[in-house]
Structure formats: structure tokens, C-alpha cells
């Protein structure tokens, strides 16, 4: 399977090179990176191009004018599909992927050709204290348990168990992606497009897998800015919205 890694970006000049560096350290480097610049006003795209060249990555910039992680991720995925990529992975521009990430993705889809694979996400080491790290992981477990039993994640043709999936750590085959309709092209304030994709995949009759070997560390800047409780409210149902959504 041809693997594409898609990264939606908005004003990520300070992070994107680090993310790309983590991809350059992959044990399995047989992939292409599609960076979708979502109307950045900084040097995100040019930094990504320079870093990709320096790191020897096969990298392409995609542009999406409609603001929103859903629209940007969808544009990157569809650009990859148009070029014949049949295995699609997504991470974010403030994330560091484990060196075995792509290998774990490929291994899973060799065993399960269709469906969506969700990995394990934690905070970037050094951005939070060890105590706060434990609290974040406990909060993540609480959130995943809540999602597993949340009534709105069942009924209306949704099949199988709900699996909490972070947009910074997922993979899906192109056939399933198209059958599910892809990421909803929404603004981040409107909808959690990663959660919606999980349910759209289930509605299409495919399974969502938890793949613990897929490991990603992500910036804790939102939690640091909003606090843990407000961040949980945001991720649960947008009941909390800070004055600044795109925290940089």
C-alpha cells in the first residue's frame, strides 16, 4: 500500500520543522508527506519546504483557503488519493511521531486492510511536569471512557464500538475514507472532525481499531493556556471556548 502522511497547518512556523524531523526518523520511510497550508500568515509553508528538502522527505504543499482543520485535512487526504495513495495517515503540525509510527500503521493495515486505526497520544515530554503528565493521561482515559458510553455515539446505523480518536494520530484506507465521506469540511469551532469521522466510518459499516503501537506526542499548549478542566469541556462538547481558539 502507498502511504501518505497528511498534516493540516495554520501558523505553525515554530513547530512544523520539528514535526517533519520526527517523520524523517521513521524506521519505514516509504511515504509522502502532504502539508496543507490553511491560509497561514507566517512562514509555515516555506519552512516546511526547506525542512523537507534538508531532511530528504518526499513532501508536497497543498493549499486550502477555507479555514478549518476539517477542510485542511480533507484537502490533503484527497490530494493524496488523487495521486494514487491508498493508505492515509494524519498527524498535526505540533506533534512528534514515534520512530515506529509508519511501520505500525503499515503492519496494522496488512492485517486489517479496511477501517480506521486510532493511536495513542500523550503530551510532548518536557512541556509539562511529570505530575501534570499523569493528570493528562488520566483525563484522556476518562474522556475515552466517556466517549465509549456516550449515547450520541450509538444508534442511527452506527456499528461497532466507539473508539476515541485524535486527529494527530490516525490512519485510514482510501476506500473507507471515501465511503465515509471524508473529514467534514468544518471550522474547528463547529465540530470535532476527527470524532465525526469515527462515527461516519462506523455508519459506513467499517470498524475503528485502537492500535497502541501508533504513538504520538503532541503539544500541550492548549491545556497550558486554558487549564485542564476547560480543555476537557472544549473537547467534550465545545461548552468552553476561549477567546483564542488557534493557540500558538
Image: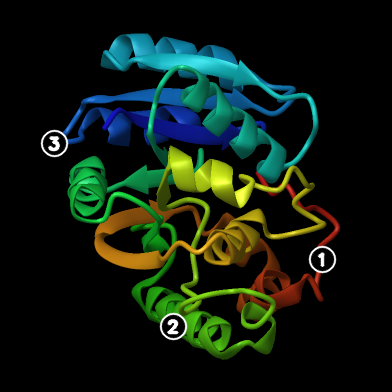
Q: Is residue 39 above or below residue 102?
A: above
Q: Which mark is residue 27?
A: 3
Reading the image, the residue beneath label 2 is 141
Q: Is residue 90 visible?
A: no
Of badges 1 and 3, nearer the viewer stands: 3
Residue shown at the point (27%, 13%) measured from the top left: 56
Q: Tell me if label 1 and label 2 are in contact, CB under 8 Å.
A: no
Query: Which structural element holds mark 2?
Result: helix
Q: Which mark is residue 241?
A: 1
Determine the CA span between mark 3 and mark 2. Answer: 29 Å
- Report whether 90 appears left or right of 75: left
Q: Is residue 5 visible?
A: yes
Residue shown at the point (51%, 34%) measured from the top left: 7
For marks 1 and 3, the one nearer the N-term is 3
Query: Which structural element holds mark 1?
Result: loop
For marks 1 and 2, the one nearer the N-term is 2
Q: Position of residue 64 (x, y in %)?
A: 71, 24
Using the image as rendered, state which of residue 86 and residue 192 is in the foreground. 86
Amino acid at each position: 500500500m502507498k502511504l501518505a502522511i497528511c498534516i493540516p497547518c495554520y501558523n505553525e512556523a515554530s513547530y512544523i520543522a520539528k514535526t517533519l524531523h520526527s517523520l524523517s526518523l521513521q524506521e519505514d520511510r516509504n511515504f509522502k508527506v502532504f502539508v496543507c497550508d490553511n491560509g497561514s500568515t507566517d512562514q509555515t509553508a516555506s519552512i516546511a519546504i526547506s525542512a523537507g528538502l534538508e531532511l530528504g522527505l518526499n513532501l508536497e504543499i497543498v493549499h486550502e483557503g477555507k479555514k478549518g482543520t476539517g477542510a485542511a485535512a480533507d484537502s490533503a487526504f484527497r490530494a493524496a488519493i488523487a495521486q494514487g495513495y491508498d493508505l492515509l495517515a494524519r498527524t498535526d503540525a505540533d506533534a512528534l511521531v514515534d520512530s515506529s509510527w509508519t511501520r505500525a500503521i503499515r503492519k496494522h493495515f496488512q492485517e486489517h486492510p479496511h477501517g480506521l486505526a486510532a493511536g495513542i497520544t500523550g503530551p510532548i515530554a518536557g512541556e509539562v511536569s511529570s505530575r501534570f503528565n499523569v493528570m493528562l493521561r488520566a483525563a484522556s482515559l476518562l474522556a475515552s471512557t466517556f466517549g465509549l458510553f456516550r449515547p450520541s455515539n450509538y444508534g442511527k446505523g452506527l456499528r461497532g464500538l466507539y473508539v476515541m480518536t485524535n486527529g494527530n494520530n490516525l490512519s485510514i484506507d482510501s476506500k473507507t475514507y471515501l465511503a465515509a465521506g471524508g473529514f467534514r469540511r468544518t471550522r474547528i469551532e463547529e465540530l470535532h472532525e476527527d470524532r465525526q469521522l469515527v462515527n461516519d466510518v462506523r455508519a459506513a459499516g467499517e470498524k475503528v481499531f485502537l492500535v497502541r503501537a501508533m504513538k504520538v506526542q503532541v503539544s500541550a499548549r492548549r491545556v497550558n493556556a486554558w487549564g485542564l478542566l476547560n480543555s476537557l469541556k472544549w473537547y467534550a462538547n465545545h461548552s468552553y471556548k476561549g477567546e483564542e481558539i488557534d493557540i500558538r
